[in-house]
Image (cartoon, rainbow, N blue to C red):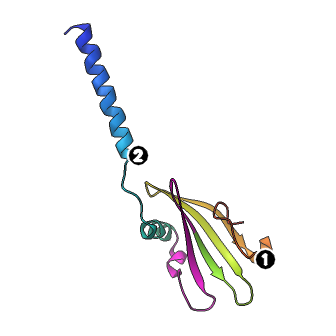
Amino acid sequence: MSIKQTVTIVLIMTLVAFVGIYVAYYAQPGLTEADAIAKVQQTDPQLQEYPSDSLPPKSIRTKSNGSGWLIQFVQEGSGVPIISAQCFSVDKRGIVTKRGSYDRVKDGEKMDLSFSDCQ
């Protein structure tokens, strides 16, 4: 086998490897909102209680971003806007990352929370 043929084979194999990596990490079908919520709920059994209309109400807030979903699990109060919350991100591959939490007693009263860090 000549050097030219060897170089050609190596270049083709490299190109195939790059295409494989791209498909594996970037060209996957999008993660749905419901799938992202389910992924987070699998990480913590207490989050299975969300959403709920019983007192105190518990809601799930979501926001799509370019790399997946930002999700807030919020416990709402009666007369107090938010009692506590936990914030997560779920990337397109389904990897869950906790981004922060909020507790009214420790963090003070807030009307709204940032999706990025729950503050």
Q: Is residue 63 magenta?
A: yes
Residue 109's disc is 1
Task: Give amino acid for label 1.
Answer: Glu
Residue at 57 percent across and 73 percent down: it is 61
Say which quadrant the C terminus sits in.
bottom right
Q: Residue 81 occupies which quadrant of the picture?
A: bottom right
Where in the figure is residue 64, as x and y percent of width and height? Answer: 52, 62
Q: Residues within 10 Å of mark 2 (few under 14, many from 20)?
A: few
Disc 2 residue type? Tyr
Residue most toward the left? 1
Residue 25: numbered disc: 2
For the magenta stretch, what is the residue range?
Answer: 44-71
Sooner in the amino-acid sequence: mark 2 or mark 1? 2
- Asked which secondary structure carries label 1, the reply is loop
- Would you say 23 lies left or right of 37 here? left
**Residue 23 at what x, y percent from top left?**
35, 44
